[in-house]
Amino acid sequence: MKNSSRIIFVALLVLVAVTQLMAGGNKTATQAVSDQDKRKAEYIYLQAMAYKAQDSIAAYYDLVKHAYQLDSTNTAISFYYGYLLTLKDNSSSEVMNRGLDLMKKHVDAHPEDFFEATFFSDACMSLKRNDLALSVIEKQAEINPNKTEVQMRLAAAYVKNEKYAQALEVYEKIEELEGKSVEIAVYKTALCSQLGDTIGAINQMRSFYNTAPANVEYNLLMSELFRQYKMQDSAMYYLDQAQRLEPDNGNVYFAKAQYYDEIGDSINYDKEIYNALVSSDLNVDTKLDVLAQYTQTQVLRNDSTERVNNLFKVLIEQHPHEPKVHELYAIYFSTMKDYKHAVEELGYELDINPSNVDAWKRLMVINMLDDNYGGAIVAAEKALEFNPDELDLYRYIAPSYMQMKQYDKSLAVYNKALALVDSTQDVELYSDLLCGKGDVYVELGDSTRGFDLYERALAISPGNTGVMNNYAYFLSLCNRDLDKAESMAAKAVNANPTNATFIDTYAWVFFKKKDYAMALLYIKSAIANADEPSADILDHYGDILYMNGDTDEAVKQWEKALELEPDKELIKRKVEDKTYYEK
């Protein structure tokens, strides 16, 4: 009965609010507010806070608004009503500024309310009113001169307002209150750099360093600062000093490796990376970060893989049962297109942690990249044994069957997946599965059923650009409804402007519409955005070049496509008979 009474009382309050609104709305600042309305407003405000504690945000907002309409002179109520206005979806700048004004009204009247002042300054910062936030924090710093938290906020506010000298003064005060620290030393040094005061920055860091010159971390900070200023001799001095203090410190080896990399000394760079990885005091996550950075550098330089492999072997010997090591090695092999060894490393990773669904997905994708669709299916089915509720895995099984031209099995998998997925909850997956099923029917020559499935997929998820792309492409292949195909392809490209496959579809639609100039423009964009253009994109490029009168270049592109897929009879005919399109 108590709960029902409270609900009835709240309902009566809402009814009173509606009646008052119909009678003329809330009291203005110039109108007197009766004691009765003040008491009502305070009670409703307390009810609102109770709803807030229960995460009933809609009720919280409605009750705070009602309390404000009853008593707009209560600055605490005004404050929270103003805050809620700043959070309203699609609020105009006028509404947001009104919200800030209501919050400011309370903060100005009660500067001692630290929590509300902090809340208000945060709201100002989020709405890019850095100047207003600064004025409030300055006031709080005056009231709380020895409160480090407030002084830190003041320094950050000065930085936001690009008042670097004032920020530096505040950090000096914090050091007086709390003593020197790495955090404050770094802040002060950065501010001197921002002010263009190189000598000041060095002196700031040196002053901190002198408090404990035998500290390895402080020596590394000094070295890093001198590296930033390209003062390499000084940087190496502090690195050597750090190494004399702790000869086997892995962080020192890594810092030296970065130094040698910056000056282009690849021999010493490799040496220090090796030393860092064999060091016993670096944890495995840090070592993986070091190796990932090193591997990326070597790949970008097209350098020898032997050194990378040796380093991975060292790390695997140290941490044979760490799945992340095998995961990174598999990623490296994939980048090098060594899919066989990538699969092997993922196998080790999954032996250690067979429930890792992301690793199973990587294994499936690598098999598909290697045209090993049977392997992808085996991996997906194994993954489902360990992750039976991961319906996303069906995305890999069905397309793999389709690539193997086992269309009945592909359709069976799609039907099973569609029966398991809740179309009202996992809309995107359901839409993708409908699209995949449509692809199978189009491949079977039943475009009517295929296009119907595309329509259903878009009805469920109108913004699904993958469906738009496939639908547009197959419409163009059938020479049907090319205006609709162009519209869908354009939407897909606009949403994914660097997706080479989507851009290729758009180019092909223009080709089918005999707009060869636009087709050439977009196929060149597809080539530029593709890491390695597929045979289909190169084939399309050749066709489009041919229709733009560049036969010789067209043949070159067809030949490139044929190198990737030597069994494509149609491309062979184009290469052998340059008048193919004239017949």
Image (cartoon, grey):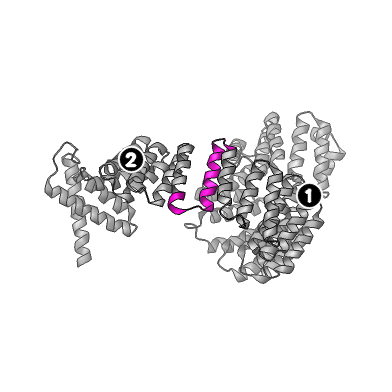
Q: Could you say which disc has been placed on residue 266 in the image? A: 1
State the image quarter where residue 323 is shown.
Answer: bottom right
Kindly identify the residue that appears in the image at 21 percent across and 51 percent down. Answer: 14
Kindly identify the residue that appears in the image at 13 percent across and 40 percent down. Answer: 32
4 relative position to 355: left or right: left
189 relative position to 402: left or right: left
**Quarter of the figure that contains the C terminus:** top right
Secondary element under disc 1, as helix, strand or loop, is helix
554 relative to 382, above or below: above
Q: Which residue is mark 2?
A: 100
Secondary element under disc 2, as helix, strand or loop, is helix
Q: Residues within 10 Å of mark 2 (few under 14, many from 20)?
A: many
In x, y percent, where is residue 448? 61, 48
> Residue 192 lies in magenta, yes or no?
yes
50 relative position to 253: left or right: left
Please name the predominant secondary structure of the magenta segment in the image.
Answer: helix
219 relative to 495, above or below: below
In x, y percent, where is residue 85? 33, 43
Q: Amino acid at mark 2?
A: Leu
**Quarter of the figure that contains the N terminus:** bottom left
Q: Nearer the viewer, residue 402 or 539?
A: 539
Q: Nearer the viewer, residue 428 or 487?
A: 428
Camera sees residue 309: yes
Q: Amino acid at mark 1?
A: Ser
Badge 1 or badge 2: first in the primary sequence: 2
Q: Nearer the viewer, residue 225 or 129?
A: 225
Tell me how far mark 1 sits from mark 2, CA to CA. 56 Å
In x, y percent, where is residue 366? 71, 58
Span colored in magenta: 175-198
> Residue 105 lies in magenta, yes or no?
no
